[in-house]
Amino acid sequence: MPELTFVTAHLGGVKHPEDSLRYLAGKCPNVYLDCAVTARYLSDEQILALIRAHGADRVLFGSDCPWDSPANEIAMINRLPLSDEERSLIICKNAEKLLLKIKNN
């Protein structure tokens, strides 16, 4: 369903990052991945690999409260070797783009 936009939680499967990399990341232009609670289960290297494979322009900030705090998720994004633009995309610009898309449909 290429006309439908999907948001998948936990970078596509926090307990199965290899499957997310193999089957999802970068393969579906209509799929966004959120990064909620990923720092609790994945290494920074795994998180970065998934972001790089899928593209920072299709990754969304997520906190998954009450299981983790937004501050922890922002700290994770800030410690990754991402550009300022990639951080901005993940933390707010991608969500803004999706919300505008919904509003305009």
Image (cartoon, helix red, strand yellow):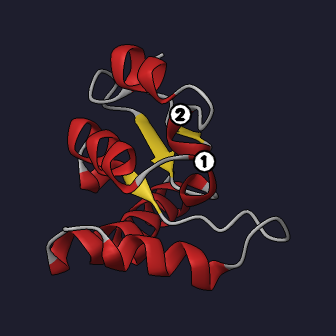
Residue 72, how many percent across, how many down?
59, 78
Residue located at (21% from left, 45% from top): 52
Q: What number of labels is visible?
A: 2
Q: Specify whether 4 is left or right of 63.
A: left
Against 41, residue 4 (above or below) is above
Residue located at (29% from left, 78% from top): 88
Measure how far apart labels 2 and 1 are at the Cα level.
13 Å
Q: If you read the primary sequence from the N terminus, does the residue marked by circle 2 or circle 1 appear first?
A: 2
Q: Specify whether 79 is left or right of 69.
A: left
Against 74, residue 25 (above or below) is above
Is residue 2 visible in the rendered image? The answer is no
Q: Are marks 2 and 1 in contact (CB under 8 Å)?
A: no
Mark 1 residue type = Tyr
Which of the two residues, 91 or 5, is positioned nearer the viewer here? 91
Report crowding for label 2: few under 14, some 14 to 19, many 20 or more residues within 10 A (C-alpha): many
Residue located at (74% from left, 70% from top): 68
Nearest-to-viewer mark from 2 and 1: 1
Is residue 30 visible in the rendered image? The answer is yes
Residue to which mark 2 is pinned: 12
Residue 43, how many percent across, how many down?
44, 50
Instruction: Look at the numbered disc 2 and give the secondary structure of its residue.
Output: helix
Instruction: Look at the numbered disc 1 and give the secondary structure of its residue.
Output: helix
Mark 2 residue type = Gly
Q: Which quadrant would residue 31 be assigned to in this image?
A: top left
Which of the two residues, 6 or 60, is positioned nearer the viewer here? 60
Q: Indicate which disc residue 41 carries.
A: 1
Report crowding for label 1: few under 14, some 14 to 19, many 20 or more residues within 10 A (C-alpha): some
Farthest-out residue, right = 66
